[in-house]
Amino acid sequence: ERDKYENNDVAGVVTGLAWTSVGGDILFIESILSKGKGNLSITGNLGKVMKESATIAMEYIKANASQLGINPDVFDKYNVHIHVPEGATPKDGPSAGITMLTSLVSLFTQKKVKKSLAMTGEITLRGKVLPVGGIKEKILAAKRARIKEILLCADNKKDVEEIKPDYLKGLTFHYVNDMSQVLDLALTNEKVKNAKTL
Amino acid sequence: ERDKYENNDVAGVVTGLAWTSVGGDILFIESILSKGKGNLSITGNLGKVMKESATIAMEYIKANASQLGINPDVFDKYNVHIHVPEGATPKDGPSAGITMLTSLVSLFTQKKVKKSLAMTGEITLRGKVLPVGGIKEKILAAKRARIKEILLCADNKKDVEEIKPDYLKGLTFHYVNDMSQVLDLALTNEKVKNAKTL
Amino acid sequence: ERDKYENNDVAGVVTGLAWTSVGGDILFIESILSKGKGNLSITGNLGKVMKESATIAMEYIKANASQLGINPDVFDKYNVHIHVPEGATPKDGPSAGITMLTSLVSLFTQKKVKKSLAMTGEITLRGKVLPVGGIKEKILAAKRARIKEILLCADNKKDVEEIKPDYLKGLTFHYVNDMSQVLDLALTNEKVKNAKTL
Amino acid sequence: ERDKYENNDVAGVVTGLAWTSVGGDILFIESILSKGKGNLSITGNLGKVMKESATIAMEYIKANASQLGINPDVFDKYNVHIHVPEGATPKDGPSAGITMLTSLVSLFTQKKVKKSLAMTGEITLRGKVLPVGGIKEKILAAKRARIKEILLCADNKKDVEEIKPDYLKGLTFHYVNDMSQVLDLALTNEKVKNAKTL
Amino acid sequence: ERDKYENNDVAGVVTGLAWTSVGGDILFIESILSKGKGNLSITGNLGKVMKESATIAMEYIKANASQLGINPDVFDKYNVHIHVPEGATPKDGPSAGITMLTSLVSLFTQKKVKKSLAMTGEITLRGKVLPVGGIKEKILAAKRARIKEILLCADNKKDVEEIKPDYLKGLTFHYVNDMSQVLDLALTNEKVKNAKTL
Amino acid sequence: ERDKYENNDVAGVVTGLAWTSVGGDILFIESILSKGKGNLSITGNLGKVMKESATIAMEYIKANASQLGINPDVFDKYNVHIHVPEGATPKDGPSAGITMLTSLVSLFTQKKVKKSLAMTGEITLRGKVLPVGGIKEKILAAKRARIKEILLCADNKKDVEEIKPDYLKGLTFHYVNDMSQVLDLALTNEKVKNAKTL
Ligand SMILES: [Ca+2]
Ligand SMILES: [Ca+2]
Ligand SMILES: [Ca+2]
Ligand SMILES: [Ca+2]
Ligand SMILES: [Ca+2]
Ligand SMILES: [Ca+2]
Ligand SMILES: [Ca+2]
Ligand SMILES: [Ca+2]
Ligand SMILES: [Ca+2]
Ligand SMILES: [Ca+2]
Ligand SMILES: [Ca+2]
Ligand SMILES: [Ca+2]
């Protein structure tokens, strides 16, 4: 079985919940920095809407850098590359938005992501998190992958409440309205090992 | 129910009325600034004509900066990102024009948008507002979303007058001919909290 | 009824005659200047050939700047945006050429366009105006829109002569061979109010 | 009747012979210079192969500037725009190559093109002219347009010899193998009136 | 028979295992450096996902340059070109990822690749190798091509164990989880003859 | 009959063997230099794979400039244009690779190409020549065009041996494995007349 939660040792790697042509699944959002001039590149066989999520996350972070504790000079001195394995599977939709946001803030702050956590939700420029579809399938996939905590939009609570309680055993749910709540819940205050000095 | 009017605390967020494949709906135009070189990026699963509305609004504002009380240096020092949630819904057409114009002027002046207001109308470079379609469906959607005031092109008055008066209870209509009237009606003179100094 | 001739108070706004999927119609060519580096952007749901007309008009003006009384430095210091409302209607073909030419020369000279005038005709780089199709439908549309004078290629005279004289009452026709005749007839020597100093 | 030979007063305007969806026809290749940085733009509803002809002509001229008596500095200081009216007709194929070459050399040298001459032929980088198709239809169109002299590839002589001699009355044919012969035959040593100083 | 393992004399040439429209096959990933400004070009009739693999490999190397013993200045001073013969065969999918990674690290370090080795596996930004499909067909192709050692993702071990042992005679398998293991196994510590000084 | 071998007076012109929709044929690869900044442009109605061959040839030459006796400064100071007449015929496939390589090396060294020689073969970045298809049809076309010597990949020898010996009379074959052998056989040590000083 290939899709299991992995450790949180590396900055910029966050676990998302997706609904692809093969049903519910977990996916990883990975991002890295290299010396450069501020370019953003995106790979992973992504459709237009999912690529837009990466742009929205990046622009949101640039516009709110000081509140997020990020030195804005970093944006001009590094290139960012976001990848979503597995390349053979086409992926689309806005639901990876909060996962991408968390990945990029972890990258720019070099903070560890919370352990055994997965998330799904659309992001907006006004800082609000929007609900997404496929909640039941995504949660079952999360369980199979040994996820312990799940972060969702508050408006998705009703979707969780429709699921047979037995299926939810061992899972803790966090419901959020705002992107700042996502970051509070998902990022620890601990730096990753060998954190880069940006 | 996910589509409700939201507060007006953030600059650059304006409520529009749209007619998508699922009928009348409200939508939010969101825009933000980040340090940059004057690039305009646009997301939200938009078609060609709706993207053109963003370009027209931006160019109109640049050409009329002094009348609008905007320091033109701002255009070279910041990037603008416009997003229209929800990413999963394809959107197109010229009717978000006045909403995008209002969003960008709010962004560049950091002025609060009027409360509980929604709008729909096409913009032109000569400053005139043009009528749009789907008025009945848009107005019913506005009511469901607890909008109180609606801003329309004067040429759309006849479409409103064809709607059963009962449906219009609790709604105030503003009819405009020119883009300057849109901005007079839609923007307050109050700055948003934590207004950016541009 | 939405398509009526409008006043000529603004530089860069010229009335054209078009033949779209809904028949003969008038349309407005609008153009504006903003501080920039000489970029040309074009909106209005235009097809490839109509966009080419804008490029041809612009290049013709640049190549003949001194004869047209335009300081060529202007081309490097401003961006030009050309828009053709209404965005919901796809438009194509070369017949807006002389309208675009007149719009841009009005813009760069800040000269008023002649009142109640509409036009249709293809432009060339050698300065000659070419005839276009749909003359009858265009003329009837012009009349409905309260146009008083119509500017056409001399080779379109035969198309006008085939129309029942009754339909032409109240219309004056100007036939031209060259683009310089278009500008002589269409532009006044008066500057628009609040003319920009370029 | 709209397609007639026109005078040769303007540099950069050359008469070609084309075979479009409506049969044999003459066409004009027009080119102009404006102050710039060496960009080449092409309009006229052209297909990929015909656009390539413009590129080939331009690159050939740049590579052979000194033999052609052209100061190479000109290529960096001006933009070139090539247009082929009439915009409503799609055009493609390599047969306008020698016409484009002649147009550009006339433009860069400001030399008058020979009177009442039309031409058709493909160009190569090695300086050789290649034969093209549709010779009979093109020649009949040339006659209708009052062309007096026709310039063709020597390999097209056999196609002319198959045409009934009566049809060829009043036409003089020039057969060439090389692009230098095209320019010798098509360009006069006289500058156009109001020649630009480049 | 054209597809045989070749020697390892040249830096940047690595043998991969592919599954194309004609079945299992070996392929070569070739990469070279030329003086430049850091551009990456990719040829070989590759689909979108396979091109993305090249981007991911390149970005991974840039982000981890110091651990890989590569002077990051190299990335700005050279262009990299990656080619995958044979151009007539369309190729796609993520399975050439580790082969591209090895090719580029060999190129930037000028280290010899291990002899008679082939590999297949997807790469990620977090440094993990992912399993790929078509293992049986790829292994048989490797044997036909006289490959001696095969490098695979540990998660592909089960696919190897399903193959009749007779078919595997003469082949040694290396199973890896991480990209660093790929590089340890695939690259020797010996420089190629005539190694470039970067 | 239009397709005959031509003389070898001009640098950068090399005869290839192609297999297009009309059967076996010879083709010419032409390349020229003009003052510039190192751009590569390609024309001739070429498909993606044939354009890639041009890129591969160019990158190979840049990476091996010193072995080829080419001053690398040349790459930054000139633009290269490669054209493959005849523009009306779509062409694709990797088999022009060695012809393009020879054309570009002739161009950069201004060396004469061997007389009456034609060639076909795919190139790689590792310097190896790969076999191609359509050998019989290509050879018959070469004979019709009065070619005397043919340069092929050694792996294509078997294809030649299947052809009736009578058809091969008057033809000399050169079989190669490496791109350096191509250049040794195809280029003379004599400069072309009026060789450019690069
Ligand atoms: Ca999966
Ligand atoms: Ca997700
Ligand atoms: Ca909605
Ligand atoms: Ca709207
Ligand atoms: Ca209309
Ligand atoms: Ca028109
Ligand atoms: Ca015609
Ligand atoms: Ca022609
Ligand atoms: Ca193969
Ligand atoms: Ca592979
Ligand atoms: Ca041929
Ligand atoms: Ca060939």
Image (tube, coloured by chain):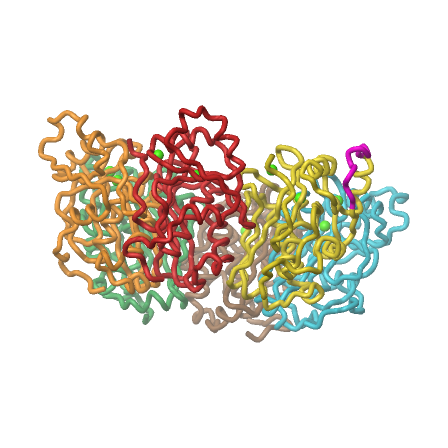
Chain colours: A brown, B green, C orange, D red, E cyan, F yellow
User: Toward the viewer: D103 or B175?
Assistant: D103
Which image quarter: residue A90? top right
Q: Is residue B145 visible?
A: no
Is residue B195 shown above or below C176? Answer: below
Residue placed furthest toward the bottom: A197
- Assign ligand 7 to one image quadrant: top left
**Residue F172 in magenta stretch:** yes
Is residue F104 shown above or below B25? Answer: below
Which image quarter: residue C88? top left
User: Toward the viewer: C108 or B163?
Assistant: C108
Q: Which residues are magenta?
A: F163-173
Which image quarter: residue E58? bottom right
> What is the x, y in percent for residue C147?
14, 39
User: Toward the viewer: B114 or D66?
Assistant: D66
Total labels: the figure holds 0
In this picture, residue A94 sits left or right of residue E17: left
| Viewport quadrant of the C terminus of chain D | bottom left
**Residue A88 in magenta stretch:** no
> What is the x, y in percent for residue C120?
24, 39
| Viewport quadrant of the N terminus of chain D | top left
Is residue A191 shown above or below C59? Answer: below
Look at 18% across and 53% down and name the residue there. C10
